[in-house]
Amino acid sequence: MTRPRAIDCDLHPTPAGLAALVPYLEPYWRDSVEERGMEALESASYPPNAPITARADWRPRGGRAGATLAQLQAEALDRFGAGIGILNCLFPVQLPFSEDMSAAFARALNDWVRAEWLDRDPRLRASIVLPMASPEHAVEEIERLAPDRRFVQGMILAMGEVPAGRRTFWPVYAALERHGLPLAIHAGSAYRHPVTSVGWPSWYLEDYAAHQQGFQSTLASLVTEGVFAKFPGLKVVLLESGVSWLPPFLWRLTKTWKGVRFEVPWVDRPPAEIVRDHVRLTVQPFDAPDDPDLVRRLLDHLRSDELLLWASDWPHWQFDGDAVAPPGLPADLLPRIMVDNPLATYARLREEGVPS
Amino acid sequence: MAARYVVAPAAEIPPGARKVVEAGQGRRIVVFNLGGEFFALLDRCPHQGGRLSEGKLCGLVESDEPGVFRYGRKGEILRCPWHQWEFDIRTGRSWHDPERTRVRAFPARVERGAVLREGIPAVETFPVRVEDDYVVVEA
């Protein structure tokens, strides 16, 4: 019996500018973009020429990295042999302060990914990009797209306007749980606040490294506000979060919980256990030295072989050549990460099975 | 084999009060009076050795869902003064890890001096009078 092929859980198709989405906007917003002279919507998270935004050999001359299905197929899906790939669009619909504009761009982006990607390669699945500036809009978008089983999760950014665990967002999590959709949290910010808690950084390096703090704070919010107590069926997938920070963060969270748990009595077991039961992470980037012994010790600290999900992070530049697997990962863990763990995480991927 | 120690006249530990006593081999034990019931714990947190006798006695808060505070058992939960770990004074078990993290609890009760005069080894740093009540700890 052949094994199912790998499930790549983090792929980033990139619209070639705002213009690519215009045909998918509703008429009012289509005209509004033109009348306002909006030519671009760019986030500081992935500046087009930043090295991490696209690998050098994935930057086409005169074109944009990650912009076409042919690029995705040649550079990632076919090349790395994925049976299924999950598309997580990072076009920054989260940036507009207008809830209505943000939701309109989210609808256009989700329709764009459906028409130009999902409809054209049966291996593809996608995140519903959620306009979290308005939980009502986010719920509407889940209800609109959940009937299409190719949408396998809802996606938000690690840094929003308020911590993600707040009850104002619970209708969103209720809708995700009801439809069997995990909540994906991708690196990135709606830039309502500095990306560090000490103020605006000067450099891109600080910005990118700070996303780890954003993930930690968001995770702490989800745990302490009781999202997993309220929605026991909800899974969370951290995308492009890095992995190596997790164990020491959970040590601190769990240690401190013992002394203040009476303030959050719904956190009725150690936070590390809650996270292990509900949260998954993609393996690119992994953020560990190449030393296999160090990686093995890190995996021991995770205390579970169910947490990690395969991902190339295409077209972001996390590795060279075909080295999707972070150096030092034990070979016997790979089938779990590539197939078993994604299948256990994504209910909708289990429905049809994975091509072998 | 536990020995029985007469550790204090009962009147010295009124309801809500606590007293640190010694019971054999210099062992420090803290005795609580909870509404007339007496409980005794080793005065040493199993975490890092904090003096539990200096901790706050609180109620127990639990929750059936976020935002719901189910509160009761006022005065029965002891918080270590060092790291605020919670211990049930009835059992010595911690809230967060009741099987593995627990402070030693000793049976404690009140007995009449007349009974005690029948020849129990006691910490007789005070006179035992037949007509008074005394706290006895098995430790």
Image (cartoon, rainbow, N blue to C red):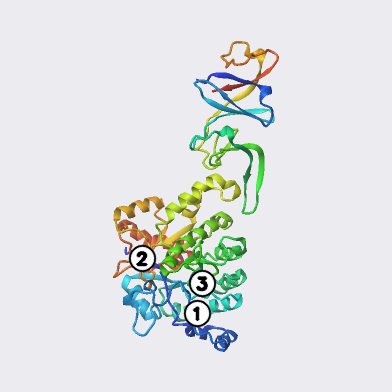
Q: Is residue A64 above or below residue B104?
A: below
Which residue is rendered at x = 45% and y = 63% of the image? A210
Badge nearest the viewer, 3 or 1: 1
User: Is residue B91 at all visible to an observer of this figure?
Assistant: no
Q: Secondary structure at mark 2?
A: loop
Picture coordinates of residue A270 (x, y %)? 51, 48
In contact (CB < 8 Å): disc 3 and disc 2:
no
Crowd rating for badge 1 (residues with CA inside 10 Å; few <14, some 14–19, many 20+): few
Could you tell which of marks 3 and 1 lies nearer the N-terminus?
1
Chain letter belonging to callout 2: A
Chain letter belonging to callout 1: A
Picture coordinates of residue A152 (x, y %)? 48, 68
Relative placement, left or right, of A317 versus A202 is left
Q: Is residue B48 above or below residue A351?
A: above
Relative placement, left or right, of A240 versus A130 is left
Q: Which mark is residue A41?
A: 1
Which residue is the site of mark 2? A4
B36 or A35, which is in the foreground? Answer: A35
Q: Is residue A222 above or below residue A78?
A: above
Residue A285: which quarter of the image? bottom left
Give the distance between the C-alpha atoms of the residues marked 1 and 2, in whole angstroms. 39 Å
- Of all residues, the one furthest to the top in this rendering is B118
Q: Is residue A170 above or below residue A297?
A: below
Relative placement, left or right, of B54 versus A112 is right
Picture coordinates of residue B82 (x, y %)? 54, 39
User: Is residue A251 at all visible to an observer of this figure?
Assistant: yes
The amino acid beneath tag 1 is Leu
Relative placement, left or right, of B36 versus A102 is right
The amino acid beneath tag 3 is Ile
Which residue is the site of mark 3? A128
Could you tell which of marks 3 and 2 lies nearer the N-terminus?
2
The amino acid beneath tag 2 is Pro
